[in-house]
Amino acid sequence: METAPAKTLQKRQVLFLAILFFLWEIGSEEIRYSMPEETESGSFVANLAKDLGLRVGELATRDARIHYKGNKQLLQLDVTTGNLLLYEKLDREVLCRATDPCILHFQLLLENPVQIIQADLQLTDINDHSPEFLEREMLLKIPESVQTGTVFPLKIAQDFDIGSNTVQNYTISPNSHFHVVTHHRGDGRKYPELVLDKALDREKQPELSLTLTALDGGALPRSGTTTVRIEVVDINDNAPEFLQSVYEVQIPENSPLNSLVVAVSARDLDAGTYGKVAYALFQRDEVTQPFVIDEITGEISLKRALDFEATRFYNVEIVATDGGGLSGKCTVAIEVVDVNDNAPELTVSRLISSIPENSPQTVVAVFSVSDPDSGDNGKMVSSIHNGLPFLLKPTFKNFYTL
């Protein structure tokens, strides 16, 4: 005949196995939804009760609610109908910037009994931004001796949309000297190049003014324009050449402002003004490039602070221009090195403030931990003090129960 302590131990073991099975079950559930950005607030996203196979009103009786990282409310749940609604308009570019796909993670938390369901909402892009050039005018100084077929790089237009809704093509206003060719960059963006079709003659036409247009690929295409002003100058038969076509450097994300990143160098075989080289950042993007260059020395320094978690790589294009207007380009590939500058964050999803005595295996808290650092800096270990009458258990994706 079994003793009372033996029966109690057996019941606890059975309950422990049941809880483990339950936690495995909640970790395996995941639902995904998709909708276009800028959808009106209050719009229907999905019926969670139907998708989860729950009865009408069961979400209310189980005290269901939505949890997501951050303080801003994005969605709202009608527990009576089970409908998941949009709390406000969602702007994909604000929430995800250039990240594609743009996925918002949230959880459906159910009590009585406790259940956690992972859910994702993907925001698809709409064509709500027009291409825009950072400068209203580009200046090209082209010697009259340049041969037909010569190619001149032009600055790109920015478009915060992605995919086919971003810039797809460039055109130039009709003229007898130039046409524009659109090329693909390694990162998927398009860039324009100006090609000389007919020789220039400074004595006949010392200056040209052309309109460069960037077109996106939306169903109703949007466009942006800038002026390309061309000054025809006298002969200068050597262009600056960089000692390296690509410079590769690494810089810690906690580097102080004005830190030297790298020094580039170009030479020009011409003498005098035509051989004097000035350096500049080719694409003056004040938002995404926190660097400046000394136009005389070619030293690139850090100006607006780095953040490894926001941007890990920069491709900075440098142009060296001599006194006659000829130029050469190089690329500086900058890798931001992670430092352990973020502490782990703990988000409590459920907390019981009081516990009846003699209530073993009661879930008193559900929480998640996160750390935006990478590698070893982002690895986390969760623990509680020894001697406490609690047990910490991992569930899934950095979720724990206490």
Image: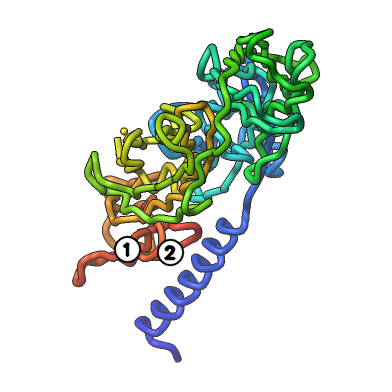
Residue drawn at the location 50% of the way across and 74% of the way down: 14
Q: Quadrant of the N terminus?
A: bottom left
Looking at the image, residue 225 sits to the left or right of residue 312; the answer is right
Viewer-proximal residue, 267 or 380?
267
* Label located before the other in sequence (2 or 1): 1
SS state under label 1: loop
Q: Are marks 2 and 1 in contact (CB under 8 Å)?
A: yes
Type of residue at label 1?
Ser
SS state under label 2: strand
Question: Would you say residue 137 is visible in this rendering?
Answer: yes
Q: Which mark is residue 382?
A: 1
Q: Position of residue 87 (x, y in %)?
A: 54, 21
Type of residue at label 2?
Pro
Which quadrant would residue 221 be assigned to in this image?
Answer: top right
Q: Residues within 10 Å of mark 1 (few under 14, many from 20)?
A: few
Give the residue number, with chain letter if any, for mark 2.
Answer: 394
**Front disc: 2 or 1:** 1
Q: Which mark is residue 223?
A: none
Looking at the image, residue 198 sits to the left or right of residue 92; the answer is right
